[in-house]
Amino acid sequence: MIKIKIKKEQITITGHANFADYGQDIVCASVSSIVTTTINAILSFDEKALVYEENKDKLNLKKFKKDHITETLLKNMIRLLKELAQSYPQNIKIIEEEN
């Protein structure tokens, strides 16, 4: 299962959807596409707007800049991930934590 932990200044994504084998998993591919597109879009506007660390089955996204573009793109990413989680509740869990 993919777990997405959303905090005020940090988003952490861990795990594998287990919808299909590695390389064949449309749920993992969807999450990766949504997140990668968002990160690239934000960084194309401002290279210092956020920092991310990527390991094999973990992505940690730290938000530093509070501007309209960064906030809008992150909200859109979260909305898309929530829609995906509704379609695949056995494969994606979103946890929103208060700071």
Image (spheres, helix red, strand yellow):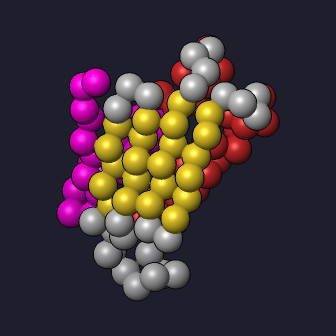
Residue shown at 64% from the left, 47% from the top: 37
Residue 43's quadrant in the figure? top right
Residue shown at 22% from the left, 56% from the top: 89
Where is residue 16 drawn, in percent x and y? Answer: 36, 70
Q: Classify residue 60 as left or right of residue 17.
A: right
Q: Examine the structure image and report whether residue 69 is included in the region drawn in magenta.
A: no
Residue 27's quadrant in the figure? bottom left
Count of numbered labels shown in the rendering: 0
- In the image, residue 4 above or below residue 45: below
Where is residue 65 drawn, in percent x and y? Answer: 61, 21
Q: Residue furthest bottom?
A: 21
Q: Which residue lies furthest to the left in this view?
A: 90
Residue shown at 62% from the left, 15% from the top: 67
Q: Classify residue 31 as left or right of residue 49.
A: left
| Visible residue check, residue 69 | yes
Choose between 10 and 35: the one closer to the eye. 10
- In the image, residue 66 above or below residue 52: above
Q: Examine the structure image and report whether residue 87 is included in the region drawn in magenta.
A: yes
Residue shown at 32% from the left, 75% from the top: 18
| Visible residue check, residue 83 | no
Choose between 89 and 53: the one closer to the eye. 53
Choose between 57 and 84: the one closer to the eye. 57
Where is residue 19 drawn, in percent x and y? Answer: 33, 74
Q: What stretch is highlighted in magenta?
A: 76-99
